Image (cartoon, coloured by chain):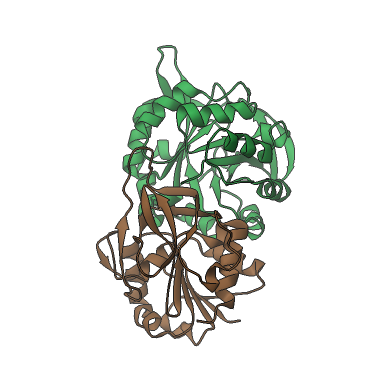
């Protein structure tokens, strides 16, 4: 049986892991390779590295750290940030990443999803979605979220964009529920459940993990394939071996740490 | 050890090179038949799609070269699928080095395709390739197509239905999962392949 995945997310700036609250106020969390190694040793199933400066600054990911990580880390990892073309993706995959995740560039030019899927297979193509509820009650997509000064509210309803992205060739969806992000009050079960209904490829929950029970809840109630989190892992509030033990006890299939 | 890593346009080259490096080996990247030489091991990695990969192999003279090669050969993921007769992905004839056909995984209730993540290897036969791989060991999979369980299968995995996770026939073998990304379990399988004397 396929295991549910625990995925620490490392926001990368200038070769260091940083963490902000609601996309702001970034604090240095340490060296990329040492954190990545720690998570691998603790039993993380996968890692996501998000180059938070690449997309807003209109440049592509610095390959140096991708290679450094790939040399050491023997679990899959995904790289996000500033990937706009087949060539951008190719050098990252060649450097040893397993998947690329696109967010704003996919919204700017949805054909990018199909181009990447055709070039590398859908399994390499993750579409990251930043989503928030508007005053009218609809969840809608945000772009350029890497920097609060550039953030844009789009007309895309989140559910429509999820469906569009899958048809275009997304092999996985990461749904970041922005209102929950960094607040540690639990994943947005309502939104994730709604997206799950529309999502036939693997769905990864992001934003809101505050304690071990939040992971149990998101797997049990929103039926996501993986749960992504950052600060609870960086701070040590949630330790992966204990988390996995609790998930196993709750009959949620995971790879033992 | 001379390890030929075949370039079929796949995207997991870096990972396979790093995994071999961690085992103390430096593979050669082989782009065409002339460069194949007489290696001790051949690895055919692959992330991508079958028709494009077969076209590249054909253009580069590697279809015949791989058929003639006598060195122990391992296909990884798409590379394993290419060892078989035919793939539904792009309805393409593959290398035909192992008997069986590649099918699309069928989605179902709670069964998402691509099959992406860690899943259990259920061993079906004794093989040096499985030495040290414990019962219930998990490996990392990322794929939408697979070979149904057949006589070449020495380990199977379940996602909706069963499919071949590791295959072995004569001096050839294949892993549907990614040993280069499957932590200690993958390292073990890759190491077993390098020690394998079929």
Q: Is residue A25 left or right of residue B17?
A: right
The picture places residue B122, in percent across and down from the top left corner, at 48, 57
Query: In this image, A134 relative to A22: left or right?
Result: left
Toward the left, the furthest residue is B91
Chain in green in the render: A
Q: Is residue A138 above or below residue B141?
A: above
Q: How many discs mark residues in the rendered view?
A: 0
Q: Residue at x 67, y 32 (%)?
A: A231
Question: In the rendered image, what is the letter of the chain coloured brown?
Answer: B
Q: What residue appears at the point 56 percent right and 52 percent down from the top-left corner?
A: A76
User: Which quadrant would residue A6 be assigned to in this image?
Assistant: top right
Q: Residue at x 45, y 44 (%)?
A: A126
Residue B55 in the image: above or below residue A132:
below
**Residue A66 seen by the camera:** yes
Q: Nearer the viewer, residue B172 or A133?
A: B172
Name the residue rendered at 52%, 28% in the picture. Answer: A218
Task: Depth check: give the residue in front, A194 or B147.
Answer: B147
Horizontal side of residue B46 vs A77, given as left or right: left
Q: On the rendered structure, is B81 left or right of B25?
A: left
Q: Position of residue B25 (x, y in %)?
A: 63, 74
């Amino acid at each position: 049986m396929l295991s549910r995945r625990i995925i620490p997310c490392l926001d990368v700036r200038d070769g260091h892991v940083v963490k902000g609250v609601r996309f702001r106020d970034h604090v240095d969390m340490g060296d990329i390779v040492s954190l990545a190694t720690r998570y691998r040793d603790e039993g993380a199933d996968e890692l996501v590295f998000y180059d938070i400066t690449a997309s807003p600054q209109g440049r592509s990911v610095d390959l140096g750290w991708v290679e450094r990580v790939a040399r050491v880390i023997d679990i899959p990892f995904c790289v996000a940030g500033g990937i706009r073309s087949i060539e951008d993706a190719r050098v990252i995959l060649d450097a040893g990443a397993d998947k690329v995740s696109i967010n704003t560039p996919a919204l700017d030019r949805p054909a990018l999803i199909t181009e990447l899927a055709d070039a590398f297979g859908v399994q390499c193509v993750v579409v990251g979605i930043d989503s928030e509820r508007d005053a009218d009650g609809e969840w809608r997509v945000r772009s350029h979220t890497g920097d609060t000064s550039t953030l844009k509210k789009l007309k895309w309803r989140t559910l429509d964009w999820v469906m569009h992205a899958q048809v275009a060739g997304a092999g996985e969806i990461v749904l970041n529920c922005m209102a929950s992000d960094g607040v540690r009050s639990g994943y947005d079960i309502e939104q994730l459940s709604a997206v799950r209904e529309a999502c036939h490829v693997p769905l990864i929950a992001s934003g809101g993990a505050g304690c071990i029970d939040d992971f149990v809840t998101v797997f049990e109630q929103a039926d996501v394939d993986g749960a992504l989190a950052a600060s609870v892992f960086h701070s040590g509030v949630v330790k992966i071996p204990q988390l996995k033990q609790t998930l196993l006890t709750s009959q949620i299939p995971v790879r033992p740490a | 050890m001379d390890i030929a890593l075949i370039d079929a346009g796949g995207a997991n080259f870096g990972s396979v090179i790093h995994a071999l490096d961690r085992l103390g080996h430096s593979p050669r990247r082989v782009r065409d038949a002339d460069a194949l030489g007489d290696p001790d091991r051949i690895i055919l990695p692959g992330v991508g799609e079958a028709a494009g990969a077969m076209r590249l192999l054909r253009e580069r003279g590697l279809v015949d070269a791989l058929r003639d090669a006598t060195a122990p050969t391992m296909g990884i993921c798409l590379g394993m699928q290419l060892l078989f007769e035919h793939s539904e992905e792009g309805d393409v004839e593959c290398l035909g080095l192992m008997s069986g056909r590649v099918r699309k995984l069928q989605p179902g209730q709670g069964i998402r395709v691509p099959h992406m993540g860690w899943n259990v290897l259920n061993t079906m036969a004794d093989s040096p390739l499985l030495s040290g791989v414990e019962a219930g060991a998990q490996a990392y999979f990322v794929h939408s197509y697979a070979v149904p369980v057949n006589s070449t299968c020495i380990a199977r995995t379940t996602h909706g239905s069963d499919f071949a996770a590791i295959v072995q026939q004569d001096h050839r073998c294949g892993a549907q999962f990614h040993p280069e990304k499957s932590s200690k379990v993958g390292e073990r399988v890759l190491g077993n392949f390098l020690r394998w004397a079929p």
